[in-house]
């Protein structure tokens, strides 16, 4: 597979592109994506065997099981980072080792349905929080020391809507959907 093909497998929906301005229409699309992600994951993973949960979307990638648990881990961090940005003055967030987390005991021993249910409940809270934000709150920031950037709450919403769709595409690829 050439580098273009590998890139397409890594980023089946493309990389996240930060918009210059977050207009209401775009924000509503992101909210809709966050609202629907857990149910989409539940729908395509219902009844999967342990063998199928070990499928990968490309050689050397995470398994379906790891991806689903990763989405829950990542979105918990994203929700927490947003709340920090809303309650503190440009806090510095703590990055985490995604690959390290993907091989911890809970990833292999806990059914993926637990992370999907966690996402369902987390996204109910997260979407309610987002829908209640005003313009000033959307502009609040946190500092990401690994990427050396300030991230606005609005950009965080877009990034996590993209993140969910990105990994949903990986799961679908691994399942041949």
Image (spheres, helix red, strand yellow):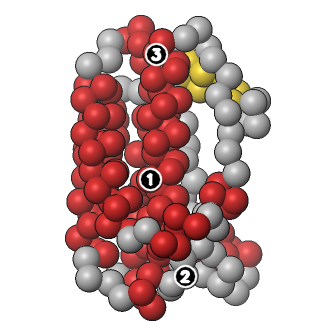
Q: Give left or right: position of 71 versus 127.
A: right
Q: Position of residue 43 (x, y in %)?
A: 23, 70
Res 167 visible: no
Q: Position of residue 96 (x, y in %)?
A: 67, 45
Q: Residue at x 50, y 85 (%)?
A: 55
Q: Give left or right: position of 106 versus 149.
A: left
For the N terminus, give its image quadrant: bottom right
Report how far apart the C-alphas of labels 1 and 2 lie in the structure: 18 Å
Mark 2 is surrounded, within 10 Å at the Cα level, by few (under 14), some (14 to 19) or many (20 or more) other residues, namely many
Of the pair 112 and 79, the residue shown nearer to us: 112
Q: Residue at x 26, y 82 (%)?
A: 47
Res 142 visible: yes
Mark 1 is surrounded, within 10 Å at the Cα level, by few (under 14), some (14 to 19) or many (20 or more) other residues, namely many
Q: Which residue is mark 1?
A: 72
Q: Earlier in the sequence, mark 3 or mark 1?
A: 1
Q: Which residue is mark 3?
A: 86
Q: Residue 93 occupies which quadrant of the picture?
A: top right
Q: Give left or right: position of 129 versus 2.
A: left
Q: Residue 151 occupies which quadrant of the picture?
A: top right
Q: Residue at x 45, y 91 (%)?
A: 51
Q: Which one is in front in this view, the residue at disc 1 or the one at disc 2?
A: 1
Cβ atoms under marks 2 and 3 closer than 8 Å: no
Q: Earlier in the sequence, mark 1 or mark 2?
A: 2
Q: Position of residue 34 (x, y in %)?
A: 32, 45
Element carrying mark 1: helix
Q: Which residue is mark 2?
A: 56
Report how far apart the C-alphas of labels 3 and 1 lie in the structure: 21 Å
């Amino acid at each position: 597979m050439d580098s273009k093909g590998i890139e397409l497998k890594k980023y089946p929906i493309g990389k996240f592109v930060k918009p210059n301005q977050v207009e209401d229409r775009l924000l509503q699309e992101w909210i809709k994506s966050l609202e629907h992600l857990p149910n989409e994951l539940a729908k395509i993973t219902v009844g999967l065997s342990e063998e199928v949960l070990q499928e990968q979307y490309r050689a050397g990638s995470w398994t379906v099981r790891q991806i689903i648990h990763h989405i829950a881990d990542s979105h918990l961090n994203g929700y927490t980072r947003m709340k920090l940005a809303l309650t503190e003055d440009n806090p510095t967030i703590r990055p985490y080792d995604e690959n390290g987390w993907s091989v911890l005991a809970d990833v292999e021993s806990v059914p993926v349905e637990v992370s999907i249910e966690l996402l369902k409940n987390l996204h109910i809270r997260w979407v309610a929080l987002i829908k209640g934000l005003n313009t000033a709150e959307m502009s609040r920031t946190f500092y990401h020391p690994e990427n050396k950037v300030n991230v606005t709450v609005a950009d965080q919403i877009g990034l996590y809507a993209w993140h969910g769709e990105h990994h949903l595409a990986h799961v679908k690829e691994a399942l041949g959907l």
